[in-house]
Amino acid sequence: MTISQADERSRAANLVEVEDLKVYFPVRSGIIVDRHVGDVKAVDGISFEIKRGETLGLVGESGCGKTTAGRAILRLLEPTGGRIRFDGDDITHLHGDELRRLRRRMQMVFQDPYSSLNPRRNVGNIVEEPLNVHGIARGKEADGRVQELLEVVGLPRNAGNRYPHEFSGGQRQRIGLARSLALQPDLIIADEPVSALDVSIQAQMINLLEELQDEFQLTYLFIAHDLAVVRHISDRIAVMYLGKIMEVAPSARLYERPLHPYTKALLSAVPIPDPAVELERERILLKGDLPSPTNPPSGCRFHTRCPFAQKKRCPDEVPELRVLENGHTVACHYVEEIDAGRITTRTLEAAEPVAVPG
């Protein structure tokens, strides 16, 4: 097999390919003269792919850019730079009818089940709207389709006559999921779909998402900050920090052997329901506050808070997202040394600390 044939086969297996994606929001100042004084670098050069039928979990602290990345893939936000491919086609700058036709194949489940549904329309109209907009079905045919969708997500067929305020948070999220399924999409971007729900309801929603994925051959980008939820549903996980991807690995491997210092810190904050294990394990506390995306640190974005940061390279060189083994990629200059124990937090106690930019 030639290299070009291998590349084509790899692309055929990928539904979504993101290459060096950037999304900046301009910062302006002045009353009389509107001046561009900077940018909020919400997403600053990320690359990843989502294979057909898989679930890619995208995790990180609030403000790291994961929701912005999801909206850019859907073209709800205009990318500042980079490239987005969907099913082999470049969609980075699609507009008009071409973008509208594309949107039939990708949908979104929003975080807030209360504000994402129009309170003035009944559930039937909410779920039916995509069918009408894209000319898929109208009248009795659309009504029947709505009833089927409501039944698929675990709601009674007659729920279409009621309004969103008559449902609980979990039921409202099911309505949003039914709306996203109306056009039979290939990709669903779920933006923290369970973060506003009770824990017991979260499990029901996760199980429902997995069942629907098997039934309709769906591909998910699952955005969340709850690492326990992401572990349960994801095939692979990408970890974001301040607009950059720090680590990507299969779900089980990431939890068993995290390599990036930021991932280690995130996982150390997840409680373990075993008091003996919880008392013995090391908790990694990150120093300082999350830097501003308007003026991010030079070099490695994480070096100002990293317990393993080295003065030699971390403040000056941007680490490349390197493939190590078994599909595990990490953006860290010293990941091998840290993993082997040659660099520890104790080895840094006598060293001169890394300067934090003002």
Image: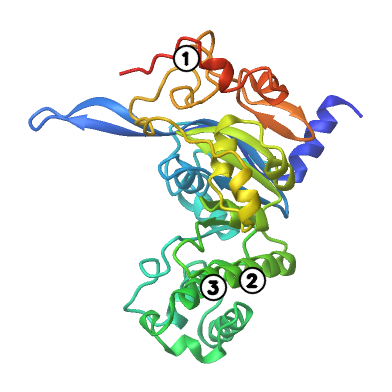
Q: Amino acid at mark 2?
A: Leu
Res 7 quadrant in image: top right
Residue picked out by circle 2: 208
Q: Which dot, 3 or 2, sits closer to the camera? A: 3
Circle 1 SS class? loop
Circle 2 SS class? helix
Residue picked out by circle 1: 315
Horizontal side of residue 9 vs 137, given as left or right = right
**Earlier residue among tags 3 and 2:** 3
Q: Is residue 261 placed above or below 349 in the rendered structure?
A: below
Q: Amino acid at mark 1?
A: Pro
The N terminus, quarter of image = top right
Q: Residues within 10 Å of mark 1 (few under 14, many from 20)?
A: many
Q: Residues within 10 Å of mark 2 (few under 14, many from 20)?
A: some
Q: Residue at x 70, y 69 (%)?
A: 211
Horizontal side of residue 301 vs 118, given as left or right = right
* Residue 338 locus on image (x, y percent): 65, 23
Residue picked out by circle 3: 201
Horizontal side of residue 356 vs 255, given as left or right = left
